Every structure is written in C-alpha cells, then in structure tokens.
Amino acid sequence: MWSIKTFEALGSTQDQLKSLAEDGALEGLVIQALSQTKGRGRHGRKWEEGAGNLYMSILLRPECELAHIAQLSLTASLAIAIALKKSLNKHELNLIVKWPNDILINNKKCVGILPESGLTPDNKKIQWLALGIGVNIKSAPIETSCALSQYSGKNISTESVRDDILGELESDYRLWKSEGFQNIRKKWLSLSYPKGSRMQVKQAHGTIEGNFETIDEYANLILQTKEGERLKISSGELLLV
C-alpha cells in the first residue's frame, strides 16, 4: 500500500507530507529524507539529526473519530518495535514501548514518533494522519538516546529498517481497521512496562505520580496513586521513578 518518495535533503519530512496531504495525496504516501535540517518531535522540540539515520513521514487516511488518534499512534509504535526486533534479529532484546509514542532499548530512546492530523470541515473526524518517524540507526545524537548499530553485529541499512517498519505497520493498521484496538492494545502492553511500575507524568499544570495499571480502549494511560485513586491521563511526558 506504500508509495515511497525519497529525497536527498529536506527541511522536514513531516512538513512536506502535511502539505501534500492537504492537497489530496493518497493514503500510503511515504516521504523519506536522507538528511533533514528542521526535524521536530513532540511539543515542538527539535529532533536531532544524525548521519545514516531514518527520517520518514507516512500518510494515513483512517476516516475515524478524533478520539481514536492515540490508538493509531500506539499502533505505529507497536509495529515499529516489532520491526526493530526483526531488523536486529534479537527477539530477546530489552526493548520497551513507552507511552505515548517512544521506543527504548536498554532505557535509551532509539525511536521518536510524531502524529499530526488534519480534520474534516465539521472537526469531528480525522481527514488525514501524518506519522513522522525518526529512527537512530547509525548514530545517537544525545546521551539519553541510542542507535541500532550498537546492538547489531551487522551493517543495518535505512532501507531495510524502513521496509521492515512499513511491512509491520501495514499489517497492524489493517488489523486495527478490521478488528479495532483490542488486539493491538494487548500486544502493545506485552512490550511495555510491567504492571505496578512506578511512574511520573509531567504535564503543563504539574506532575502526577502513580503505579502503572494499563492503557484503556482510547490509549489513555491509567495510573493508580498511593491513595488508591485511578487516574486517566491523555497526554504528558512519562518518566520512571
């Protein structure tokens, strides 16, 4: 289902894809850049670019309610996590999917995912979804990140990682469309932190702390506080305590 366009250099694959989405580009368009100068992550943060890494944005048109966008973000992170295990050929790798949309190896970030959407004129449904994906393959720009090359005994190409990700995403996206989020949710939880893990979530109005319970049917994070209160969290930055 994918139509891949690769550029030597772009400011941002995400900006390029969003512009094409607004112009009516078909679902399945993939914009890849061998280098980019204005990559960004969540909350407007700059995504540090390193040589030999994967930068791409994927266009989906799921025709779903806005409330389901977080489900698709977790569907993407699940697909990428499974693809990375295949790329590295290490199924026992200490790889964790971290809510809402990061992937860690040995507690260091190796993947960032940025979902951005356009809405229908009535603002009730998603008209298009752009999934910006950055994977550290050859280099890790900062100390808290890692690169796949650190865990592989062979040379890994951006093309092979890209194709593994797209293959898994196509499968999981079709599963989500046909059966909903339930099975995706179960698989995602199997790759995330154990139930009871102590966590903090930083939000604009303060920090919430509690034990990890689960994610719900809308991909909200569920924490239980020491007072026994169950909290439903839809956004924030997660830290282990």
Image (cartoon, rainbow, N blue to C red):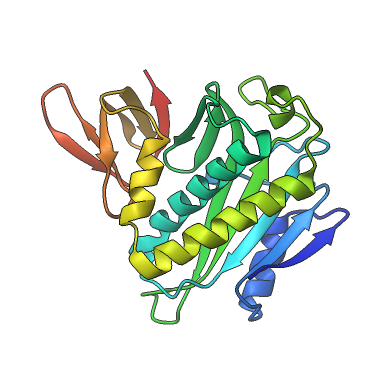
The picture places residue 57, in percent across and down from the top left corner, at 66, 57
Q: Is residue 204 visible?
A: no
Nearest to the observer: residue 57 or residue 187 = 187
Q: Is residue 100 above or below residue 153?
A: below
The picture places residue 34, in percent across and down from the top left corner, at 83, 49
Q: Is residue 110 visible?
A: yes
Q: Residue at x 40, y 74 (%)?
A: 125
Q: Quadrant of the C terminus?
A: top left
The picture places residue 78, in percent across and down from the top left corner, at 48, 46
* Among the 4 quarters of the image, the one containing residue 235: top left
Residue furthest to the left in view is 228
Q: Residue at x 43, y 42 (%)?
A: 100
Horizontal side of 196 relative to 95 (left or right) equals: left
Horizontal side of 146 relative to 207 (left or right) equals: right
Q: Quadrant of the N terminus?
A: bottom right
The picture places residue 2, in percent across and down from the top left corner, at 67, 68
Nearest to the observer: residue 35 or residue 149 = 149
* Among the 4 quarters of the image, the one containing residue 141: top right
Horizontal side of 102 relative to 24 (left or right) equals: left
Q: How many marks?
A: 0
Q: Residue at x 52, y 73 (%)?
A: 61
* Among the 4 quarters of the image, the one containing residue 71: bottom left
Q: Is residue 225 above or below residue 114?
A: above
Q: Residue at x 76, y 38 (%)?
A: 49
